[in-house]
Amino acid sequence: MDFDLSGKVAAVTGATSGIGAATAEILAGAGASVALGGRRADRLDEVASRISGAGGRALAIPTDVTQEPQARAFVDAARSELGGLDILVNNAGVMLLGPVQDADVEEWRRMIEVNLLGLLYCTHAALPIMREAGGGDVVNVSSTAGRQATLGSAVYNLTKWGVNGFTEGLRQEALHIGVRVSVVEPGMVSTELLSHNRNPVVLNAAEKFRERVGTPLEPADIARAILYVVGQPPHVAVNEVLVRPSRQQR
Ligand SMILES: NC(=O)c1ccc[n+]([C@@H]2O[C@H](COP(=O)([O-])OP(=O)(O)OC[C@H]3O[C@@H](n4cnc5c(N)ncnc54)[C@H](OP(=O)(O)O)[C@@H]3O)[C@@H](O)[C@H]2O)c1
């Protein structure tokens, strides 16, 4: 199935690696101009170069989504530099696993600030732009962890449960201004997400999980699901997409 996003502008958070980078590339490949947000400026430039090398249009905007003014500036720059804002993909996220007891609460703060507040700041900045334009798409990247809680993942579960709840509440509100709000829930994807964890018990459990899953998803598998969501005609809203590796049980 071919999707044509020519003339559209997309903003993707967490576009320096993994699912966000793949999503930016696939949306640009379908014709959208893409604003890339994330903290690592060198990695943003690499993704932007790959997109422009393939004939697409990309704008790298170094952004820490936990800083409200930066999140707002990211969305505003997408609109002013690329000429509008049709699609916001709230993808930036961190997953710091481990038991609740004796946890480093700074890790909780980071997850809540990136996975929840960053998503809220970008969405808050985007909605008036989309309302004025008569519509748009907000796609929130959640996780199977937003549907299935697991030992050692309680606070990550909390954040992704929050993303799912917020998405449904906003969906009901924003349909009145022509904005479609969707959640995409990946199972295990081969990315850098786990690399910020140092706890050997967590790393060991993750390795065992990976062995059971067999072949994880690739970032492009999720990027294609996001393209499917935003590529629908205006009367179709794909509200929720759950994508697991074929052998992932939960
Ligand atoms: N991999 C999986 O198995 C899996 C499964 C389900 C859901 N997910 C979700 O998918 C999303 C993308 O993760 P990924 O798997 O692609 O991992 P990843 O490669 O580690 O990507 C995470 C992205 O989030 C960005 N980010 C982190 N903190 C940020 C901040 N303060 N401001 C702006 N950007 C920030 C990172 O960019 P910088 O570090 O450069 O800022 C990076 O681009 C996350 O929401 C994650 O929870 C992943």
Image: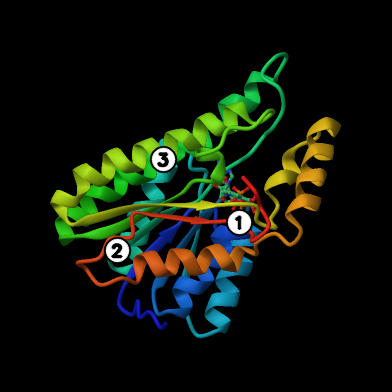
Residue 171 drawn above or below residue 227? above
Which label's residue is closer to the chain start, 1 or 2? 1
Residue 240 percent across, percent down from the top left: 39, 53
Which comes before the other along the chain, label 1 or label 3? 1
Residue depicted at 59% across the width and 74% down the height: 49
Disc 3 residue type? Asn
Q: For the residues carrying marks 3 and 2, which lies nearer the camera in this image?
A: 3
Residue at 60%, 76% (x, y): give it: 50
SS state under label 3: helix
Number of residues whose C-alpha sits closer than 10 Å to that of mark 2, classed few (under 14), some (14–19) or many (20 or more): many
Percent of width and height locating residue 66 = 49, 37
Say which residue appears at 47% left-offset and 65% top-offset: 225
Q: Secondary structure at mark 1?
A: helix
**What crowding class fits label 1: few (fewer than 14 Cα within 10 Å), some (14-19), or many (20 or more)?**
some
| Residue annotated with mark 3 | 164
* Residue 8 % position (x, y): 31, 72
Tell which circle, 3 or 2, labels the residue nearer the N-terminal end.
Answer: 2
- Visible residue check, residue 16: no
In the image, 182 versus 88, the foreground residue is 182
Local SS, label 2: loop
Residue at 43% across, 33% down:
162
Residue at which label 1 appears:
41
In the rendered image, which quarter is residue 34 located in?
bottom left
